Image: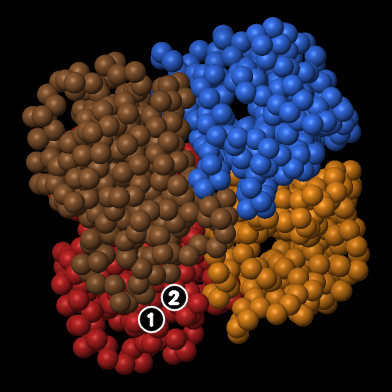
Chain colours: A brown, B blue, C orange, D red
């Protein structure tokens, strides 16, 4: 197992993160970072039982110290595994509120969960990805999960949009800095409601009107497999019925 | 062969179009449209000899009449084949010149080859794609090939950028109109030099510094296979060394 | 009057064009181009009677020949007047229709009225603007009027968006080519309903919910007066109540 | 003086902020916020001596407490003055460094100085602007100063771009929330080197190749005077020689 490639996935709950973990778990050992162990424990078990190799590490991705501890543990547990892919798929920071009702804490939290968390994550992930070049079949890949709010600030979304815009700025900056060094940096724009347990009760009119988390995971895998001659930076994904 | 899906590809030379034709030729019968038969003849032969099924039709895609004749012939030759995918990958209209040296003909030609050609192509392709829903494994797909000039007007590129911007407008409009009807409309931004016979002599510093046409074709195939829950509209593709 | 600066305005009806003509007519002689003389005749009279100097020339701006004749006449009538500003404010090409009901003529007309008209207009205007440098108080200025459809392709707007995207590509390309030569090229995005005679019956809920053509004209004048140290390329204008 | 309108300007040094203060000081009482009193003291004196009315308040705009104290003092000193305009023109957070050399503090500082500072500022300014409606000649106005990095993440600019993207997200969100309530929210993109004391030694080839801070201030004034029928959200400003 030691020389098998590694996928590090931050932000793993029962939704997109789980699909991504399963998809990358077919090819790589996967490390799952989430604050609450109950978010990754069933998934770790599932992947390990089905022939994969998964490890969960309780991590608060909005806290640099916690992120650093997680990466220290990864270095410890997988000293020889090239890091094939790192995915920042943060859950936190979503808030929808009239601007004047937002608290400073809510605004900060959106920025922390998204942009600052991504900063800490990338600072540890990028050196590992740079080092992995040549040891794995595909270019080492760093993917950030964005949303509609990554490209559009809307009424009641001042906090979340600030976090998501900042995350996209980070992703673009890293793509321009580390792309030429062979690391594939991508950003996705998830534009719509994802079909996960948390949204089961949300009514979106029409059949197949929510994004499939497995299809999102497939798109991440596709991005990962692109050769360095032909990197995509940004991919927008939405249900066919979505207004945009 | 009659019920096999059909892929219609406009703009097929020895470059990207050929890679797209080979890629989609693995799954579908392919119809290749190009003004000059010498552009598709070797490819038609190659695909037919390797177990696929290809037909070339000499077509001037910038001329509505010629496009209509081509689609009439397709209807004739493949009366029962659902059209799984239509790809508009125009070659014409590229011109790089100081604005005041551009002729009216050059400006018109850029618009004709790109936007107006795409209009004629889409008017015939869309009804076929709508009709194909449910008859093929994936959502019927309409893809337009864009370029850097699709999102940036530059000095010396007034004509080409006008054509490419207009093509993107058309693609977006169609995505918003026919996406909800189940047709997957996508637009790609090819940002860099493609590694094809015509560009062999072009020096782009660095290893692997040109886009792989096969990788572009793979990305088109990937777009085609996305489920309707999770459509991408736009994909930007560039070599890792490209400045952007 | 001979050495007074000149403003050339293409697309003058009883709406925005008229406001622009009145605004620039306070400082410059104005030439008004419109196909139908009834569009500019009352305005020419009004400006001339109020101490300004206006000339109307019947011109089909979507037709290069007609545009060239108009500029020949301008050269004739104003041999010594530096061209301070040229404004392309086209009226034609608007069509809102399901894509499959669009005729080739409608699609072409949108492109012709917008992009190709602008091309012909700019080819004649740019040399005059370059020549005017230093003879007028402000940098010579070329402004193109855009719309929501300049940056967003929507269902039922395939033709109009194609024309408006292409126009924006042209404007960007010219700004990047002639800005460094001292000509100020700008593009405006008029996002909403303009309060003109033609839209009087259109109901847009709320007070002051339509764009003021005089305020649009003021913004054009403001753009014109910017020094070359501080050029704006793009200005989006919308009523405060507009959804965007 | 009590009922004269008020302009609150955050981020005032010897550059753009000073020009903005002078420009708005012709019409309004001005409050200048800057951490270091030496940044605003000469300016306050200059404005007061030339017939205007200025007050400086030492404020750390990246610190919510400090911002709140400043607004408390404003309420105290100007209990009856309608707030005509609030401008967030932050100086802090600029850093240009390879990503892996950025410290967490530098990344946080960029976000704090830009986005979080703007959040605190807007939370106090917006209620005052809403209240001022009808008491001043123009719609109350909130302007945020952006930069090239507001719309483009680049190598070595991960921190600054994150802050500037987030600031733009905030501005967009506020424009969409408070525009319909009659507050004019705008965002400018300053694309180039501003001609201020700090950049005097910077060589930018060509004559007039730096942005004029007075011209920037004029553009802010122009935005402020737009009627609510015709609000601009975004204005990009650059020297004619700037590459973009």
Instruction: Give the labeled residue for mark 1.
Output: D129
The reply to the same-chain question for discs 2 and 1 is yes
The residue under the point 85% across, 49% down is C103
| Residue A183 falls left or right of residue B121 | left
Q: x, y (%) of residue D66?
A: 16, 71
Q: Quadrant of residue B90?
A: top right
Nearer to me, C66 or B229: B229
Question: Residue at point 87% right, 53% down?
Answer: C60
Say whether residue C111 is left or right of residue C134.
right
Where is D70 relative to D15, above or below? below
Q: Is D241 placed above or below C188 here? A: above
Q: Residues within 10 Å of mark 2 (few under 14, many from 20)?
A: many
Considering the numbered disc 2 on the image, is that residue within a helix, a strand or a loop?
helix
Residue ID for mark 2: D178
Q: Name the side, left or right, on which A77 lies relative to D191.
A: left
Quadrant that contains the N terminus of chain D: bottom left
* Residue A85 x/y as whole percent: 29, 31
**Which residue is rendered at x = 64% and y = 68% of the image?**
C192
Q: Nearer the viewer, residue B100 or B146?
A: B146
- What residue is drawn where x is 40% and y is 60%? A200
Q: Are marks 2 and 1 in contact (CB under 8 Å)?
A: yes
């Amino acid at each position: 197992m030691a020389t098998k490639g590694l996928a590090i996935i931050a932000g793993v709950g029962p939704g997109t993160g789980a699909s991504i973990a399963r998809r990358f778990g077919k090819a790589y050992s996967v490390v799952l970072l989430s604050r609450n162990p109950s978010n990754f424990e069933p998934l770790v078990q599932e992947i390990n039982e089905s022939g994969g190799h998964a490890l969960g590490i309780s991590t608060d991705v909005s806290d640099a110290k916690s992120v650093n501890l997680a990466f220290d543990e990864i270095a410890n547990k997988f000293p020889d595994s090239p890091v094939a892919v790192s995915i920042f798929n943060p859950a936190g920071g979503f808030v929808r509120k009239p601007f004047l009702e937002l608290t400073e804490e809510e605004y900060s939290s959106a920025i922390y969960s998204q942009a600052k968390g991504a900063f800490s994550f990338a600072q540890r992930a990028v050196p590992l990805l740079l080092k992995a070049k040549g040891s794995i079949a595909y270019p080492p890949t760093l993917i950030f999960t964005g949303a509609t709010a990554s490209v559009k600030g809307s009424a009641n979304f001042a906090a979340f949009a600030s976090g998501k815009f900042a995350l996209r700025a980070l992703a673009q900056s890293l793509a321009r800095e580390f792309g030429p060094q062979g690391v594939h940096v991508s950003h996705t724009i998830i534009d719509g409601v994802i079909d996960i347990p948390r949204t089961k009760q949300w009514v979106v009119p029409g059949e197949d009107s929510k994004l499939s988390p497995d299809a999102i995971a497939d798109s991440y895998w596709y991005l990962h497999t692109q050769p360095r001659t032909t990197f995509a930076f940004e991919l927008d994904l939405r249900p066919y019925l979505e207004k945009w």
